[in-house]
Amino acid sequence: MKIVVTTPTGHVGSRVVHLLLQAGVRPTLLARDPARLAAEVRERADVVRCDQGDGDAVVRATRGAGALFWVDPPTADDDPVAGYARMGANAARAVRENGIGRTVFLSSTGAELRSGAGEIDGLGRTEELLEATGAAVLHLRCGFFYSNLWGEVDALRHEGVLRTTLPLDHPMPWVDPRDIGDVAVARLLSDAWTGQRVQAVHGPEDLTYAQAAAILSEALGRPVRAERISDEELRATLRAAGLSDKQVEGFVGMSVWMRDGFRSADARTLLTTTPTTLGSWAWERLRPLL
């Protein structure tokens, strides 16, 4: 079976590729820049230079596919929601025109709202577009990626602070992207599911920012404190980084919805819980950067 993987150098996609290779599969990798792939990966995979924003190219690259791992890649569109939806439309077109039997889509907690969750609304729209094909699709609704903390390295190193617009006692799922890749590959290799489904990937436990700061303090060997900032402070930081107004609101909106009493539609169960703790991830992946 031909398995196609998008964003093969991403935090989740690279894990998917590694596990498929270990399983004896020769995957087809859609890469905007194939040179970013390790030589040993290129030798063991069929690599197609492909911009996921090009619908014709996506259809050509996925011909003959039996399964697809789809990620809406980061987009430079002024409106990130529209950008993600545009990518999702290309995925749906490929599924429909090529008769792809099963798609595993990297979505997010909050996509079920369909509106009001900032950039995540674009993932919700992609879910709808894939479902409209009538083909089997599994939406992986994931929690907060540990790897997002790489963007906080300077603040952690120089100030020992972890900033958020959320209440410091607000619990939410945190997850290692590698664990998401494990779940994705298990589903890509299985033919035991059909229809249109959702599987949450919640990590080992829900954490507040206050709890996360305490865990990081221990793992990093330096004090870390959580600090709440206002939406306006975050907006100012993002504008200073050169983001447009719609890009800023898309980013800010990803936390606003969580403050309004939202509870995930997908309960924490054996199937949604993954093993890697924030502490072990931070020791291995974050501590060396500080």
Image (cartoon, rainbow, N blue to C red):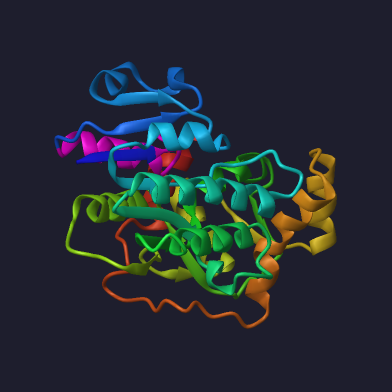
At a point 71% along the width and 63% down the height, the residue shown is 253
Specify start and end residues of the magenta stretch as a single range.
Answer: 6-23
At a point 59% along the width and 73% down the height, the residue shown is 113
Residue 136 in the figure: left or right of residue 145: left
Residue 186 placement (x, y as % from top left): 23, 54
At a point 51% along the width and 54% down the height, the residue shown is 217
The front one of 85 and 21 is 85
Residue 280 in the figure: left or right of residue 154: left
Residue 92 placement (x, y as % from top left): 47, 52
The image quadrant that residue 209 belongs to is bottom right
| Residue at the left extreme, as displayed | 24
The front one of 92 and 275 is 92
The front one of 83 and 200 is 83
| Quadrant housing the C terminus | top right
Q: Say if residue 73 shows up in the picture.
A: yes
Residue 80 in the figure: left or right of residue 184: right
The image quadrant that residue 131 belongs to is bottom left
The front one of 146 and 143 is 143
| Quadrant housing the N terminus | top left
At a point 60% along the width and 60% down the height, the residue shown is 120
Q: Say if residue 167 shows up in the picture.
A: no
| Residue at the front extreme, as displayed | 97
Q: Is residue 12 magenta?
A: yes
| Residue at the bottom extreme, as displayed | 261
Does residue 174 sit above or below 6 in this rendering?
below
Q: Is residue 114 magenta?
A: no
- Total count of labels: 0
Residue 90 placement (x, y as % from top left): 52, 45
Residue 155 in the figure: left or right of residue 60: right
